[in-house]
């Protein structure tokens, strides 16, 4: 189909494996569970799955602390289960993206266990070790994202090691060529297994300045980490040549892909890491912070469009495993009107949409009420100011059963109380549900060249109500008009639009084409209207 490229024309669905589907009743999702849901995923209409980490891990940060880069944690299954997942996914033309966490390992990784044994251990220089500052104390002012100083004292060898996240996540020393080689072997291991791509966790933090200068500080920011300009511990110049090397490896295989999580980066910075000899994409996480108004979304889209050139490709994200779900950010009740609006937005923009499991049924965050229930260590640490990230990681709501169809055992996090009515089974049975709207949008996007590839051209935006744009390629145009408000609104269109003949592609509020020739299209409250030229 018109040189279809899965990561550019398709849609990527993030699964948090702990919470998707449990096949063996231990309360934790697993690979056989995911395999059993591949038909569901295929039928929904996505093209790829990004799996949050499934490697052996002591779970200090639920998998983002890896103890073996080429293994599968037994709680998720075996390497045979993984091979089976690849085989079954590929059979359905679903691609698999692994999460590579390469800024740091677990402190239980054999490399670190060796490294901390002695100063002359061959693995010592695989991590970032430093003497105390003259007169004692930490070597410099670098902090941990998750609170406290970034340096941990090791009694045994009398040096500090650096950890940008938890102390159980020591940072690798990327300046060491042996580390580089070992990691590139990991890349080849998974690529040879048939994995289609990687999501690179905080890749722009791999290199730290070799001179360990103090970061300049600033006044505002919630914690000391955020009150620094990260001049010396993020975005170092060594990153670009490494990305070139990553890309060379990927390009040895057909149609492989890498998307980077650009940590603390603005859109310019993210864009600078993508291109033909760098990453295919770097996340733009801007949408996760926007209030529910067309103005801020419009500006974010415009800016992203401006900073990317014709060799790079945008992406859009409304949800992930680190932030409150969009349904929780934007709604205070069980009404889904605003979620229809957002679904239409994310699936009609120019760029790869990333969906997060449960977004398609409007899952809300589970409320976190008591400190003793918190699983996420940053929730424990910053309680009650920040309750951690458990809210958006609750089990997938498959049906109205007591455990939501997720497990026969005790789920590792509680199911949301709304599972009794908000679940896949119920929404599949209701043709007006959010699930069906996502499914239709995914189908429309797949069938529409303008939606997949067309130029993005804003028509108008009213900061509080309306966002409208066209997507155009050749002589085909799709018009998208989205009313963000709970009042009716009108879209004024130019004669270039009224002159054309239109057909209704989709709306959540009507089944017939509106009158376009009047130069004013009236939109119902929270209506997302999508038309195409005929
Ligand atoms: C970013 C990941 O998305 C987050 O979940 C994790 O805690 C940190 N990186 C550390 O790996």
Image (cartoon, grey):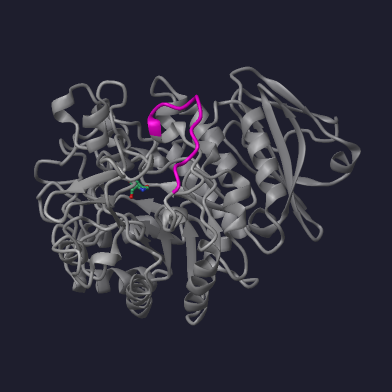
Whether residue 488 is visible, yes or no, is: yes
Coordinates of residue 426 in the picture (x, y in percent): 32, 38
Q: 237 above or below 255?
A: above
Q: Quadrant of residue 266?
A: top right
Residue name at image x 59 percent, y 40 percent: 345
Residue occupying image coordinates x 69% and y 24% = 463
Give percent across and percent down for residue 460: 77, 33
State the residue at coordinates (34%, 60%). Answer: 39
Query: Which of these two is toward me, 464 or 323?
Result: 323
Residue at (25%, 53%) from the top-left corner?
A: 63
Residue 309: x percent and y percent? 71, 58
Q: Main secondary structure of the magenta part?
A: loop
Residue in the foreground of this view, choosing between 98 and 405: 98
Q: Quadrant of residue 333 in the image? A: top left
48 lies left or right of 147: right
How far across and how far down the image is residue 288, in percent?
Answer: 49, 36
- Say if residue 60 shows up in the picture: no
With 282 as the anchor, is 139 left or right in this view?
left
Q: Is residue 251 left or right of residue 111?
A: right
Q: Nearer the viewer, residue 146 or 254?
A: 146
For residue 183, above or below residue 15: below
Q: Residue 140 lies in what quarter of the image? A: top left
Residue situated furthest front in the rendering? 135
224 relative to 295 in the view: left or right = left
State the count of labels.
0
Q: Is residue 348 in the magenta section?
A: no
Residue range of the region highlighted in magenta in the rendering: 213-224
Instruction: Say which quadrant the N terminus sits in.
Output: bottom right
Task: Work out whether residue 132 or residue 486 is closer to the camera in this orientation and state it.
Answer: 132
Q: Is residue 214 magenta?
A: yes
């Amino acid at each position: 189909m018109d040189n279809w490229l899965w990561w550019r024309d398709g849609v990527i669905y993030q699964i948090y494996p702990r919470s998707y589907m449990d096949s063996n009743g231990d309360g934790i999702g697993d690979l056989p569970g995911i395999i059993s849901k591949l038909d569901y995923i295929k039928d929904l209409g996505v093209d790829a799955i990004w799996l949050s980490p499934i490697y052996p891990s002591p779970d200090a940060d639920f998998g983002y602390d890896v103890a073996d880069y080429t293994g599968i944690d037994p709680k998720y299954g075996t390497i045979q289960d993984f091979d089976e997942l690849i085989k079954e996914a590929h059979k359905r033309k679903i691609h698999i993206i692994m999460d590579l966490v390469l800024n740091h390992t677990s402190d239980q990784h054999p490399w670190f266990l060796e490294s901390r044994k002695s100063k002359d251990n061959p693995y010592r220089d695989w991590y970032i070790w430093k003497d105390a500052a003259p007169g004692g104390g930490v070597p410099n002012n670098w902090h941990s994202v998750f609170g406290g100083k970034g340096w941990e004292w090791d009694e045994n060898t009398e040096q500090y090691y650096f950890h940008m996240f938890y102390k159980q996540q020591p940072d690798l020393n990327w300046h060491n060529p042996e580390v580089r080689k070992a990691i590139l072997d990991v890349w080849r291991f998974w690529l040879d297994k048939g994995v289609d791509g990687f999501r690179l966790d905080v890749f722009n933090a791999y290199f730290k300045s070799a001179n360990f200068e103090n970061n300049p500080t600033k006044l505002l920011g919630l914690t000391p980490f955020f009150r620094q300009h990260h001049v010396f511990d993020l975005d170092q110049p060594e990153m670009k040549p490494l990305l070139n090397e990553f890309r060379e490896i990927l390009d040895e295989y057909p149609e492989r892909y890498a998307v980077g999580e650009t940590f603390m980066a603005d859109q310019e910075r993210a864009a600078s890491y993508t291109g033909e000899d760098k990453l295919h994409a770097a996340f733009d996480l801007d949408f996760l912070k926007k209030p529910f108004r067309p103005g801020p979304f419009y500006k974010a889209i415009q800016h992203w469009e401006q900073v990317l050139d014709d060799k790079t490709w945008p992406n859009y994200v409304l949800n992930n495993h680190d932030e409150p779900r969009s349904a929780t950010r934007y709604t205070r009740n069980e009404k889904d009107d605003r979620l229809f609006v957002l679904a239409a937005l994310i699936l009609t923009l120019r760029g790869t949409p990333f969906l997060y499991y449960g977004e398609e049924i409007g899952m809300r965050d589970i409320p976190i009420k008591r400190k003793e229930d918190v699983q996420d260590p940053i929730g424990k640490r910053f309680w009650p100011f920040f309750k951690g990230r458990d809210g958006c990681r609750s089990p997938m709501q498959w049906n109205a059963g007591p455990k939501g169809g997720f497990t026969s055992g005790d789920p590792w996090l509680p199911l949301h109380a709304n599972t009794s009515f908000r679940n896949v089974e119920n929404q599949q049975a209701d043709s007006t549900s959010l699930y069906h709207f996502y499914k239709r949008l995914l189908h429309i996007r797949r069938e529409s060249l303008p939606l997949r590839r067309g130029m993005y051209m804003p028509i108008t935006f009213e900061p509080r109500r309306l966002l409208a744009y066209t997507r155009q390629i050749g002589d085909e145009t799709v018009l998208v008009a989205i009313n963000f408000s709970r009042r009716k609104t009108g879209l004024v269109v130019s004669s270039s639009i009224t002159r054309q003949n239109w057909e209704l592609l989709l709306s959540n509020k009507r089944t017939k084409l509106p009158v376009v020739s009047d130069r004013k299209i009236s939109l119902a409250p929270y209506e997302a209207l999508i038309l195409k030229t005929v």
